[in-house]
């Protein structure tokens, strides 16, 4: 019994140390950001992180504990027991080190620790891997092998402690009792202590510096805690009574049916072309390097159209941004609605509304539209024809994500002109691709790969629009250019930060009454749906989360979510709020408390709507 007990104690303690080792490694991995913290704060990362490290250690100890409990009553030879433990520890080492390596690599791009957000992307590994560059890959691979080797070596040493023994029935009963007590202690470690609140990510948060809180989080726990339960739980995000939430939400949205609007189009039934620009944050479109604009074509079109100066992306990923733009549906702090096709298909959508008005509806993308259930969402919300890399008729090499924007824009330009030659009105959507990681494009304008890829997309789109301007189709055309989300440029710009969420939107085309108009009112991507459809005298009652930007009766604010947090901004200030820890990350202005309540009402309303899927 002493050897058996020593084996499980050694397993637990060595596992805690192995988990704790992730903290200094993570801080070294992101040394530039860690350098901004004091020595006491860096120490706090490791000390506060121990709670979740011990929880993970408890999970890992559970199977060895169970096997050794069985071994009290079932004869398992010493050699066989050691082999069982070694096989188990080998598997855990491989899985755990893989999760840690993936987490370290993704944090640079996602801004939060590994969780179940990655699961939908695993269904299309080729497309998911297309974002990974060699500079991301080789350190992560090295970390994987080194960390796995260390865990295997340590745990092999632990298994050598184990000794089998023959005991009487009476002593077996005594050992079982003691072993059940040990199991209770392991359960306490898994639970995170005897307090009323079980182990959760917020328990390791200790600083107003979100990077330090993220660094203290164990990525294995973060993934398991989100993947092992439904992210849509009845009690989550319940801040107000249902009646109070509805009242607050109605005040925030203002009923579209009774609101006046300012007409900005020459026609109530223009042909609509929607161009969703991949990763086109304002930090890129506003950038000038050595006197040279990164996106000169987009910027030049401002004088010919309607420019929305204060538009904010509702989220940080293409799947979520696409739904916000095309369905006027804001984003949940944790889940992508595309993960729930049955609910996604019930959403209102610009395409569905226009299809009901007799419009032909198409969607074109140079990559694989199966990625993150996109094609299911498109067909389910009124798109009649989806064209992607599987059906595009090109005899050119594929980039990592699909066909580059130059050939796709040429194809889409032809498609729009062909649609214009028919008698039916049309709604044609293009999602660009080349300004996505890894930013490999047949172009050389800027040394920075992010800027160079954006400049390439800008030129491709600019040439496409110029073709339309030279055709009769331009007269009845409304072209809407809008980004799907922002991007980490500069590279230290984190998900959810104000500059990263600010994105461009421009309306141009012959259907626009007056060019050179700048709209300074604050708004979100999700507001496009109600704004566009109101201009076309089409009912927007179903678009609960979308506001008419041109209506003077509508509250003007931008709203966005990030990993279990939200932001809200208006001309009176802004707030960024962490829902995990219920704390303000950043704020400005005198109405911060009201902004928090407003954001909570929006999230509660959305969460309830998703639960009703």
Image: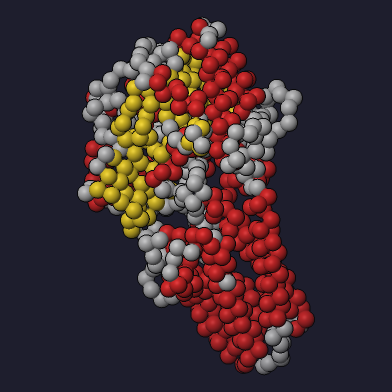
Which residue sits furthest front? 290
- Say which quadrant the C terminus sits in: top left
Q: Is residue 506 visible?
A: yes
Q: How many marks?
A: 0
Q: Residue at x 53, y 68 (%)?
A: 23
Work out whether residue 169 or residue 311 is closer to the camera in this orientation and state it: 311
Left or right: residue 215 versus residue 240 is right
In x, y percent, where is residue 375?
57, 32
Q: Residue at x 37, y 29 (%)?
A: 308
Left or right: residue 161 versus residue 612 is right
Q: Residue at x 55, y 72 (%)?
A: 20
Q: Is residue 222 visible?
A: no
- Say which quadrant the N terminus sits in: bottom right
Instruction: Classify 561 as above or below 452.
Output: below
Instruction: Classify 94 as above or below 118.
Output: below
Left or right: residue 331 versus residue 25 is left
Instruction: Classify 405 as above or below 11.
Output: above
Instruction: Classify 287 as above or below 134.
Output: above
In x, y percent, where is residue 181?
52, 83
In x, y percent, where is residue 142?
69, 61
Q: Residue at x 74, y 25 (%)?
A: 395
In x, y percent, where is residue 303?
40, 21
Work out whether residue 392 or residue 81 is closer to the camera in this orientation and state it: 392
């Amino acid at each position: 019994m002493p050897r058996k007990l020593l084996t499980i104690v050694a397993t637990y303690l060595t596992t805690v140390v192995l988990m704790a080792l992730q903290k200094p490694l993570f801080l070294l991995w992101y040394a530039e950001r860690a350098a901004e913290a004091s020595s006491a704060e860096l120490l706090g990362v490791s000390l506060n992180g121990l709670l979740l490290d011990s929880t993970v250690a408890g999970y890992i100890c559970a199977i060895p504990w169970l096997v050794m409990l069985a071994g009290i009553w079932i004869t398992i030879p010493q050699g066989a027991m050691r082999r069982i433990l070694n096989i188990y520890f080998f598997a855990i080492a491989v899985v755990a080190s893989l999760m840690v390596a993936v987490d370290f690599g993704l944090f640079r791009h996602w801004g939060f620790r590994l969780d179940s957000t990655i699961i939908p992307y695993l269904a299309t590994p080729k497309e998911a891997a297309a974002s990974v560059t060699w500079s991301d890959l080789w350190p992560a691979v090295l970390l994987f092998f080194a960390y796995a080797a260390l865990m295997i070596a340590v745990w092999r040493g632990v298994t050598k402690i184990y000794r089998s023994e023959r005991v009487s029935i009476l002593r077996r009963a005594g050992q079982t009792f003691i072993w059940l007590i040990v199991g209770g202690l392991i359960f306490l470690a898994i639970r995170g202590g005897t307090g009323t609140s079980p182990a959760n990510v917020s328990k390791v948060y200790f600083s107003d510096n979100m990077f330090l809180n993220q660094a203290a989080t164990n990525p294995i726990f973060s993934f398991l805690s989100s993947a092992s339960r439904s992210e849509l739980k009845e009690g989550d995000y319940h801040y107000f009574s249902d009646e109070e939430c509805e009242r607050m939400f109605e005040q925030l949205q203002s009923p579209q049916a009774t609101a006046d609007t300012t007409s900005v189009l020459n026609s109530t039934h223009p042909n609509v072309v929607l161009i969703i620009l991949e990763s086109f944050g304002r930090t890129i479109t506003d950038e000038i390097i050595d006197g040279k604009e990164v996106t000169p074509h987009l910027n030049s079109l401002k004088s010919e159209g309607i420019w929305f100066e204060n538009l904010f992306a509702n989220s940080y990923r293409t799947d979520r941004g696409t739904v916000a733009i095309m369905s006027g549906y804001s984003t949940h702090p944790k889940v992508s609605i595309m993960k729930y096709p049955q609910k996604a298909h019930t959403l209102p959508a610009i395409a569905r509304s226009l299809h009901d008005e007799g419009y032909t509806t198409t969607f074109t993308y140079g990559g694989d539209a199966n990625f993150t259930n996109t094609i299911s969402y498109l067909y389910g919300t009124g798109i009649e024809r989806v064209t992607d890399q599987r059906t595009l008729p090109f005899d050119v090499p594929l980039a990592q994500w699909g066909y580059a924007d130059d050939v796709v824009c040429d194809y889409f330009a032809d498609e729009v002109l062909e649609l214009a030659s028919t008698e039916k009105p049309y709604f044609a959507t293009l999602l660009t691709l080349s300004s996505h990681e890894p930013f490999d494009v047949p172009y050389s304008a800027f040394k920075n790969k992010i800027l160079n890829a954006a400049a390439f997309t800008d030129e491709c789109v600019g040439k496409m629009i110029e073709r339309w301007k030279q055709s009769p189709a331009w007269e009845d055309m409304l072209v809407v250019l809008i980004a799907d989300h922002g991007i980490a440029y500069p590279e230290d710009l984190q998900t959810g930060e104000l500059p990263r969420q600010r994105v461009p939107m421009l309306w141009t085309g012959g259907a626009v009454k007056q060019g050179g108009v700048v709209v300074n009112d604050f708004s979100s991507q999700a507001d496009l749906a109600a704004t566009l459809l109101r201009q076309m005298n089409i009912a927007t009652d179903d678009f609960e989360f979308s506001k008419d930007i041109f209506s003077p009766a509508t509250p003007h604010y931008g709203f966005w979510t990030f990993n279990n947090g939200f932001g809200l901004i208006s001309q009176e200030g802004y707030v960024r709020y962490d829902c995990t820890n219920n704390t303000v990350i950043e704020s400005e202005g005198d109405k911060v408390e009201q902004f928090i309540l407003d954001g909570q009402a929006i999230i509660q309303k959305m969460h309830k709507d998703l639960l009703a899927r």
